[in-house]
Amino acid sequence: MVGIRTSQLQITVLLTTYYSLLTFFQPTRFFTYIAPLFNRITAMAKKETKSNLDFPFGKENLTWMFIGIGVIFIGFYLMIGGGSDDPKVFNPEIFSPRRITVAPVLVILGLAIEVYAIMKKSKE
């Protein structure tokens, strides 16, 4: 019996509170002024989520980009060295074909791969 009385009391309090809120806020004013504002806010939120989901590059584009970066790093790594510890001594290793031909070609090839990765149309 005690449980039934408390639930009836809770329902009565909720209904009374609901009725007083309805009479205080008057639903016509709410729907006239607040509802359009709420609709604008939700529309803006939907637009923001759509723009966040659009990424210009797909998985294949990113793979090609990482390959291009790797080729560029290999080219710069091949350019390292060839100098002399003593500035008065000339080391002809600085003009080796690896540093003058192979490494710059790899760097340019890596840049070409990057351009391809950016320009390639994504399938996604």
Image (cartoon, rainbow, N blue to C red):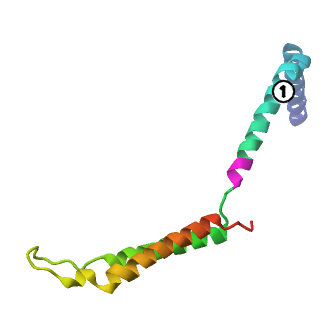
Residue depicted at x 44% and y 73%: 107
- Is 98 left, or right, of 117 in this rendering? left
Residue depicted at x 13% and y 77%: 85
Does residue 3 sit above or below 108 in this rendering?
above
Q: Amino acid at mark 1?
A: Pro
Boundaries of the magenta span:
50-54
Residue depicted at x 74% and y 40%: 45
Does residue 79 sit above or below 45 in this rendering?
below
Quadrant hosting residue 15: top right
Q: Residues within 10 Å of mark 1 (few under 14, many from 20)?
A: few
Does residue 56 sit above or below 44 in this rendering?
below
- Percent coordinates x, y for residue 105 in the rendering: 44, 78
* Residue tagged 1: 36
- Percent coordinates x, y for residue 99 in the rendering: 32, 80
* Observer-nearest of 65 and 12: 65
Q: Residue furthest left?
A: 88
- Percent coordinates x, y for residue 104 in the rendering: 40, 76
Q: How many marks?
A: 1
